[in-house]
Image (cartoon, rainbow, N blue to C red):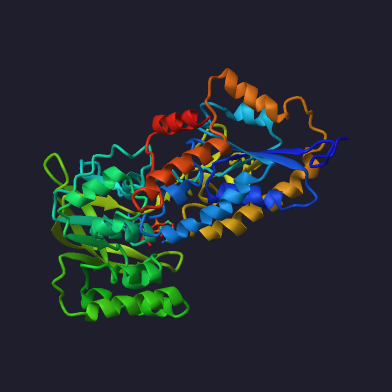
């Protein structure tokens, strides 16, 4: 029997998605000195790095330094980057099963969660995922009709994405001009009339899911006041008890108390953080003009947690832009069992499992947000992907002896060529990267992003 992962029969792995989770999984495999393998990293766009490119806020450039680590994985001679290849379109589930021994789905969470309130889809009311994609030059969102011709925006949600979009709306465009923010977004922000962003947390200050550096950063933005009503952050008994062991919640509360103690400011722009408040309707005649909100209180849920409950006290907050930043959601992908309850690929510790039978899908794995849901910072993916790889390695003996007919890397190339797919290789990405960086250097910016796939391919083809 041929043993997989040896010179006689190197292991062939496909990673679907070139974001941090996928690349950390690839690296964890490459780090095994005993394993001979080649890894193909498939990616829908010619640009790798997932949310590092398309999600991280432009004013957080230092976080993007992780790209250097991820780049080393792509540069490994055992790895091929197959960019501009869409899973389910250019390569189907059956194709991957034919060409690879093991497949890691690291497709992230590409959709938003919904508020399920009337008016949520009015023009001017968007999911944060679209707004983030818009300012980051993600090809799917470059044409989002963002209209900043209003004085107030409401951001729903109390996570770090809510902090990101809030900063983008109030930060001076001159500061953002030195970043890799998409040019059209920068131009739109220069015309913005937004003066206040109201952030709505449905639960209390002690339950906010943002982290302390992010809420602290709001108070350091030039030309921006942060307003918190002291009454809004008074804690009930249960919240106080729940915070005892939670260092982040305590530090968040201290920061919020500091904001609440500040005298009213006169800066040109303002962030107002409100708690125990839920949107119940987006109001407007043809486009968002206001949000009807309800005051909440907290009650203990059956699991002992604290959940929000409407009190029947309503008010209307005028706002011409409404961003719901209430979490991302993985969407089902072709051929892979999905768990609608958690909006993740159905898996146990990274191993894809059929929900009806409980049977393992042999050689198929999940990593990142598609595995565990949309939580955690970029670095959290490293140990998480390593745990998926541990499951992959444990399965290797089961996969031994599989016929080798299609496991030749050249066969994937030939297959994609026959289908007319213009695969963007790592060398192509390097050319695109150099082009974007050169354009950025001329303006004192890290890069000027190309925001459509045809533009990217044009640069790539010119460089070949
Ligand atoms: P998140 O941390 O899960 O926050 C989601 C927020 O939405 C929570 O405050 C949640 O409140 C609220 N929410 C959910 N459903 C709601 C509803 N129907 N109405 C009102 N509020 C609702 O998610 P995220 O902000 O999208 O961030 C995703 C992950 O990326 C997080 O782990 C985050 O830390 C990470 N991230 C990190 C950074 C950074 O490091 N700077 C930047 C961006 C993202 P409840 O708690 O009441 O459910």
- The residue at 40%/29% (across/down) is 454
Farthest residue, direction front: 442
Residue drawn at x 46%, y 44% is: 330
Q: Nearer the viewer, residue 431 or 285?
A: 431
Q: Which of these two is toward me, 446 or 279? A: 446
Of all residues shown, which one is farthest toward the right? 1
* 142 and 346: which is toward the camera: 142
Left or right? Give the position of 229 relative to 5. Answer: left
Q: Residue at x 75, y 52 (%)?
A: 32
Is residue 180 toward the left or the right of residue 334 in the image? left
**Would residue 350 be seen by someone viewing this image from the given angle?**
no
Horizontal and vertical percent for residue 304? 44, 69
Whether residue 273 is situated above or below residue 419 in the rendered picture: below
> Which residue is at a point 82% across and 41% down the rendered structure image?
6
Q: Is residue 381 placed above or below 113 in the rendered structure?
A: below
Q: Position of residue 217 (x, y in %)?
A: 33, 69
* Residue at the far left in the pictured view: 285
| Viewer can see residue 369 | yes
314 on left or right of 220: left
Q: In which quarter of the image is ligand 1?
A: bottom left
Residue 129: x %, y % from top left: 36, 47
Can you tell which quarter of the image residue 453 is in? Answer: top left
Vertical position of residue 345 compared to residue 264: above or below? above
Q: Relative to residue 381, is residue 165 drawn left or right?
A: left
Residue 235, how many percent across, how many down?
31, 78
């Amino acid at each position: 029997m041929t043993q997989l992962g040896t010179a006689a029969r190197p292991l062939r792995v496909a990673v679907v998605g070139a974001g941090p989770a996928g690349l950390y999984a690839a690296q964890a495999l490459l780090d095994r000195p005993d394993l001979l393998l080649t890894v193909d990293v498939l990616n829908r766009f010619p640009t790798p790095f997932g949310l590092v490119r398309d999600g991280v806020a432009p004013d957080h450039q230092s976080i993007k330094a992780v790209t250097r680590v991820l780049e080393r994985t792509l540069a490994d001679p055992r790895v091929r980057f197959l960019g501009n290849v869409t899973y389910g379109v250019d390569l189907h589930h059956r194709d991957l099963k034919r060409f690879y021994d093991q497949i890691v789905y690291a497709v992230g969470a590409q959709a938003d969660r919904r508020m399920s309130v009337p008016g949520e889809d009015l023009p001017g009311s968007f999911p944060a995922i679209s707004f983030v994609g818009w300012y980051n030059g993600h090809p799917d969102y470059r044409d989002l009709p963002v209209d900043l011709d209003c004085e107030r925006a409401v951001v729903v949600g109390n996570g770090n994405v809510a902090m990101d979009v809030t900063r983008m709306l109030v930060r001076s465009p001159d500061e953002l001009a030195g970043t890799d923010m998409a040019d059209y977004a920068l131009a739109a922000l220069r015309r913005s009339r937004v003066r206040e962003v109201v952030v709505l947390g449905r639960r209390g200050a002690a339950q906010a899911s943002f982290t302390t550096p992010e809420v602290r950063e709001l108070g350091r933005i030039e030309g921006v006041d942060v307003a918190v009503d002291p009454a809004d952050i008074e804690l009930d008994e249960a919240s106080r008890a729940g915070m005892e062991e939670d260092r982040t919640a305590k530090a968040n509360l201290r920061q919020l108390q500091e904001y609440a103690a500040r005298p009213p400011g006169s800066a040109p722009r303002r962030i107002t953080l409100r708690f125990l408040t839920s949107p119940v309707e987006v109001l407007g005649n043809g486009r968002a003009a206001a949000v009807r909100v309800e005051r909440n209180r907290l009650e203990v849920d059956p699991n002992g947690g604290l959940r929000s409950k409407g009190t029947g006290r309503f008010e209307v907050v005028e706002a011409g832009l409404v961003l719901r930043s209430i979490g991302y959601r993985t969407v089902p992908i072709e051929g892979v069992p999905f768990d609608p309850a958690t909006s993740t690929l159905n898996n146990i510790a990274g191993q894809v499992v059929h929900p009806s039978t409980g049977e393992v899908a042999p050689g198929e794995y999940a990593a990142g947000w598609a595995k565990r849901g949309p939580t955690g910072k970029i670095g959290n993916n490293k140990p998480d992907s390593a745990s998926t790889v541990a499951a992959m390695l444990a399965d290797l003996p089961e996969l031994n002896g599989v016929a080798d007919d299609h496991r030749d890397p050249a066969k994937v190339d030939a297959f994609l060529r026959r289908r007319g797919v213009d695969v963007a290789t790592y060398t192509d990405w390097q050319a695109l990267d150099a082009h974007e960086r050169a354009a950025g250097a001329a303006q004192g910016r890290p890069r000027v992003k190309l925001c459509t796939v045809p533009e990217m391919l044009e640069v790539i083809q010119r460089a070949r």
